[in-house]
Amino acid sequence: MAKKRYKRDFEALEQRRKIAARLLAKGMKQAEVARELHVSRQSVSVWAKAQAVDKEGWRRKPLDSCPGLNPAQRRWLCKLLVRGAQANGFPNDAWTLRRIGQLIEQEFGIAYGKTNIWLLLKAMGFSCQRPAGRASQRNEEAIRQWRLKRWPMLKKKPAGREESCSSSTRAA
């Protein structure tokens, strides 16, 4: 049977941290506070450090809700990407997630992680394109001539063998 997951009660958790802050302020040791509230000593230690930095360190921190790029910025990013990496100051025309992240931060002042860049690109209709792995200076005619003339001379030929049986055992 699947384990049932419960939603966390953020107000109750905040209340517990507030009680811990009061107990610590009264001079109670961290281990005693942990026993009193049925939590780990590590949790109380983290709360105490937060309390030392900020008197209201027990309060719940809001989730980081970075707004990201708005639709106009996404359209502008799309134009920049279509222009190519070289046109945007990179040494070659290959886009990587790191380069796109640098471009977004430079143009819009918003820092994205690689995963979020990938999700953003996917939402904008872009897909992963693998480079062909061929040099831009490649000369197809020279390659064809080499294959026709030079390769047959270099290629090893199998040693001449006499007709034999498919069995590797000797005849008696």
Image: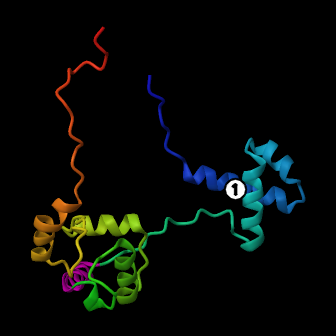
Q: Residue at x 90, y 59 (%)?
A: 27
Q: Secondary structure at mark 1?
A: helix
On whether residue 101 falls in the magenta region, the answer is: no
Name the residue carrying label 1: 17
Q: Tell me the magenta residue range.
A: 70-83
Q: Farthest residue in the top direction?
A: 172
Residue 28 horizontal/vertical position (percent): 88, 54
Colour basis: rainbow
Q: Residue at x 40, y 83 (%)?
A: 105
> In the picture shown, does residue 165 fall above or below 76?
above
Residue 6 horizontal/vertical position (percent): 50, 39
Residue 107 horizontal/vertical position (percent): 35, 89
Magenta: main secondary structure: helix
**Left or right of residue 48, residue 127 in this image:** left
* Most foreground residue, 52 or 134: 134
Q: Quadrant of the C terminus?
A: top left
The quadrant in which residue 112 appears is bottom left
